Amino acid sequence: MTPDKKLHVCNGGRFVSRGIGAHPSRMIDSCELILVGEGRLSMFEGEQEFHLAEGDFLILRPGVRHGGLGTYPKDLWFYWVHFFTEDPNSLPVSGHLVNADKSRTLFGLLLNNQSDRGAPEGSGELLLALLLAECRRAAAVMVRLPEPAAVTEAKRLARMEFALPATSAGSIAAKLCLNRDYLNRL
């Protein structure tokens, strides 16, 4: 347990699909964090469906039926970890991680920690806390950041000039006095 006793890591792993089988339909007594490394994972929890791609996460709740929506694709792999927390409803449900590479690194460290008999007490929970912070960060970015004004204006121009033969990302960027690459990143 962490010093604040709010998290407890049970077990985790990395699932690599061979293109056969599906996630079973079940209810668990813990939370489960899933982070898609590559491919697409389609699941349900309760009445809600999730279609996750690379860099997306899903946190499943205890006592709610979940399962796969079809056969695992061959190119799919994902990390997973079961854990307990005092307030599972305070966690975000799903989202796209701001820095997926950082989260994959944290997951790798968590799995290494799990197999290290000499790991300091509470280190797994600290790594999980960092992973959950990244999930909260992703959810906060989705909620708080409005679309940049340049993107809104670029969309408006693209709709207005869609039928014109000279319309391109470069021409729209020029009208907005922006670099085309910068507009594409936005």
Image (tube, rainbow, N blue to C red):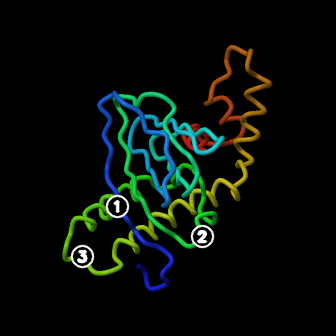
Residue bearing mark 3: 119
Residue bearing mark 1: 11
Give the spatial CA distance, label 1 vs label 2: 19 Å
> In front: 157, or 47?
47
In percent of the image, x 37 and y 50: which residue is there? 79
- Badge 1 crowding class, 10 Å Cα cut-off, few under 14, some 14 to 19, many 20 or more, is some
> In front: 144, or 54?
54
- Residue 103 place in picture, x, y as percent: 41, 58
Q: Quadrant of residue 11?
A: bottom left
* Three-letter amino acid code at the position of disc 2: Asp
- Badge 3 crowding class, 10 Å Cα cut-off, few under 14, some 14 to 19, many 20 or more, is few
Q: Is residue 10 left or right of residue 56?
A: left
In percent of the image, x 49 and y 84: which residue is there? 4
Residue bearing mark 2: 87
Camera-side mark, 1 or 3: 1
Q: Is residue 4 above or below residue 79?
A: below
> In front: 11, or 24?
24
- Residue 72 place in picture, x, y as percent: 40, 31
The mark total stands at 3
Work out which quarter of the rendered image holds the N terminus and state it.
Answer: bottom left
Quick one: SS at disc 1?
Answer: strand
- Residue 160 place in picture, x, y as percent: 80, 24
Give the spatial CA distance, label 1 vs label 3: 14 Å
* Three-letter amino acid code at the position of disc 1: Asn
* Three-letter amino acid code at the position of disc 3: Ala
> In front: 42, or 66?
66
